[in-house]
Image (tube, rainbow, N blue to C red):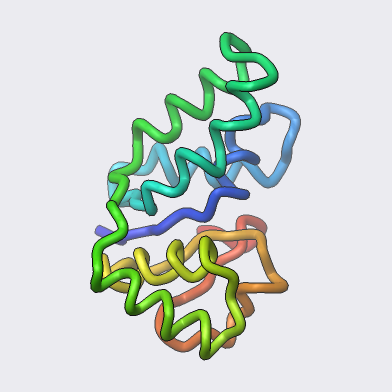
Amino acid sequence: MVIVAFDSDVLIYAADDQQPLGTPVVRLLSDSSVIAIGSVLLRVETLVKPLRLNPSGVETENLMSILGRLTLIPCSDQISMTAVSLGVRYGLKGPDAIHLATAIDAGADQFLTNNRKDFPTTIREIDIVYPDAAP
């Protein structure tokens, strides 16, 4: 079993049938050997816009289904302290630091994101994986 933590951008790709980077994300989410996790912040980052624009649309339904496949982890005191440390070390903004801290504190093996600017593969605490290189 491998634990994969997800960033919001890759979940949005997975909800869009026209987005090629979504295909490896959907494959990972369907793999029974993958434990999919993420921060509860994923709800806010992925659902606000589609619910505002088209609450009963396909994208909204797809995102709700995708989020239902993940174990969403609340932001604890420990995660927030890890996020502060990561934010300082890597220059991350708050939500990005929380996503990464959630992955690390939950013991994830990989953090899946397409945000190459903020999450370079040089981050030492966890393997950063981009969708075009996902297994």
The residue closer to the viewer here, 18 or 100, is 100
List x then y, in percent, for residue 120.
63, 79
List x then y, in percent, for residue 111.
46, 65
**Quadrant placement of the N terminus:** bottom left
Does 108 sit left or right of 10 as displayed? left
The total of numbered circles placed on residues is 0
Does 55 sit left or right of 124 as displayed? right
Q: Quadrant of residue 16?
A: top right
Q: In the rendered view, would you say 134 is above or below 127?
A: above
Q: Residue at x 50, y 40 (%)?
A: 44
Q: In the rendered view, would you say 72 is above or below 133?
A: above
Q: Quadrant of residue 131?
A: bottom right
The residue closer to the viewer here, 15 or 32, is 15
Does 77 sit left or right of 28 as displayed? left
Q: Residue at x 46, y 82 (%)?
A: 86
List x then y, in percent, for residue 26.
51, 38
Q: Residue at x 55, y 44 (%)?
A: 45
Does 101 sit left or right of 19 as displayed? left
List x then y, in percent, for residue 78.
24, 73
The residue closer to the viewer here, 4 or 23, is 4
The residue closer to the viewer here, 99 or 132, is 99
Q: Residue at x 46, y 88 (%)?
A: 124
